[in-house]
């Protein structure tokens, strides 16, 4: 039984380009060159790799270009295997299933200033954002790119660096910059965002803790370790569309319980950072442990890979 079809789009690898040490840029297109579903700047797609892995990557082309999805992938020799598979096993013409794009940042009319902070390959979501802001003529944005020495995606970033839109901070030469001074003062018309390694995103999160949540956006490479709740109690998931009831054992994830009940839910990170397993909830008291949903979204959605329940029964929109 599957309560929710897993939607993937068939794409072919139309281009592969080296873009720095250990980095490849993959261009995916519709096999018949139809337009692809639209996406917001900084949105993600899940790639369903030939070896069965599902991995999430930021789109780095400009959203107005809907003929292709462009992703940049750094080969992580000690990673979970997705980047190795893409680098070592995928070639031009290969078919890859991808999810519909999700997430990203919609530059609101009320946001006058954008400050982005990226660590290394964490620059990818901001590349699409920067291209978008330039196209719509937003004058006030800057991307601070912190690297040890080499600039990833150098050819893609060169025009933005030249235009002063991307400021490169090389830690091998000048040490680590102070994030607070890069970001500046809190302001309702300012949007700040960070994507990079764990230490950087943690520091950024602490530094912006007092900012309005809607003005801060953080993307992580790696999911934090699973949170074990020693006081977790069993509860029942009630699936509104079918009337099915599924028991979640104490300490079990909703995702595992749903899978045991034969319900397919798309997943990628299994740690609350990618957004692949988002499900609507209708009734109950969910405990949100993800790092992707906004307070507003949490009123209607949860991430089944990490969320819990503070009540005996939780009704899901499944
Ligand atoms: S699988 Fe990534 S948030 Fe749940």
Image (cartoon, rainbow, N blue to C red):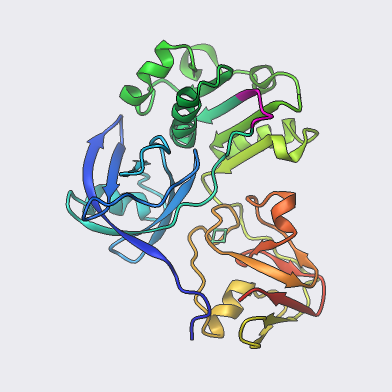
Height in image: 256 above or below 100?
A: below
Residue under the image location 67 percent in, 74 percent down: 316
Residue 18 in percent (x, y) is at: 25, 34
Quadrant position of the C terminus in the picture? bottom right
Residue under the image location 37 percent in, 45 percent down: 76
Q: Quadrant of residue 99?
A: bottom left
**Looking at this view, is 301 or 228 the one in front?**
301
Q: Quadrant of ligand 1?
A: bottom right
Residue under the image location 50 percent in, 42 percent down: 40
Magenta region, main secondary structure: loop
Q: Quadrant of residue 151?
A: top left
Q: Is residue 203 left or right of residue 87?
A: right
Residue 77 in percent (x, y) is at: 35, 46
Q: What's the magenta region? A: 109-114
Q: Is residue 251 visible?
A: yes
Q: Quadrant of residue 142?
A: top right
Q: Is residue 43 left or right of residue 230?
A: left
Height in image: 255 above or below 86?
A: below
The magenta stretch spans residue 110: yes
Residue 165 in percent (x, y) is at: 49, 17
Q: Is residue 248 visible?
A: no
Q: What number of labels is visible? A: 0
Residue under the image location 73 percent in, 51 percent down: 296
Height in image: 70 above or below 98?
A: above
**Looking at this view, is 281 or 48 the one in front?**
281
Residue 278 in percent (x, y) is at: 59, 62
The magenta stretch spans residue 189: no
Q: Is residue 85 left or right of residue 250?
A: left
Height in image: 74 above or below 262?
A: above
């Amino acid at each position: 039984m599957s309560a929710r079809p897993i939607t993937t789009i068939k794409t072919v690898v139309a281009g592969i380009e080296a873009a720095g040490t250990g980095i490849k840029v993959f261009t995916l297109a519709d096999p018949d060159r139809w337009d692809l579903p639209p996406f917001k700047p900084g949105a993600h797609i899940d790639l369903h790799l030939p070896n069965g892995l599902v991995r999430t990557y930021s789109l780095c082309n400009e959203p107005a270009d809907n003929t292709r999805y462009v992703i940049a992938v750094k080969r992580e020799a000690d990673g979970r295997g997705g980047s190795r598979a893409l680098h070592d096993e995928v070639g031009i013409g290969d078919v890859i299933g991808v999810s519909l794009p999700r997430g990203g940042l919609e530059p609101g009319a009320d946001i006058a200033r954008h400050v982005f902070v990226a660590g290394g390959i964490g620059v990818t979501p901001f590349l699409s954002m920067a291209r978008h802001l330039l196209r719509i003529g937003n004058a006030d944005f800057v991307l601070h790119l912190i690297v040890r020495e080499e600039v990833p995606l150098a050819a893609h970033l060169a025009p933005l660096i030249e235009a002063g839109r991307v400021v490169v901070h090389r830690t091998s030469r000048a040490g680590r910059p102070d994030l607070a001074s890069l970001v500046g003062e809190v302001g309702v018309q300012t949007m700040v965002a960070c994507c990079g390694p764990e230490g950087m995103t943690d520091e950024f999160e602490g530094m912006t803790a007092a900012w309005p949540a809607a003005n801060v956006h953080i993307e992580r490479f790696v999911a934090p370790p699973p949170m074990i709740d020693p006081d977790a109690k069993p509860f029942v998931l009630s699936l509104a569309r079918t009337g099915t009831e599924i028991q979640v054992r104490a300490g079990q994830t909703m995702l595992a319980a749903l899978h045991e009940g034969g319900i397919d839910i798309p997943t990628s990170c299994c740690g609350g950072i990618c957004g692949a397993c988002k499900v609507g909830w209708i009734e109950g008291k969910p405990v949100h442990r993800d790092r992707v949903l906004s307070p507003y979204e949490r009123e209607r959605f949860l991430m089944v890979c990490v969320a819990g329940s503070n009540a005996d029964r939780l009704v899901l929109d499944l």
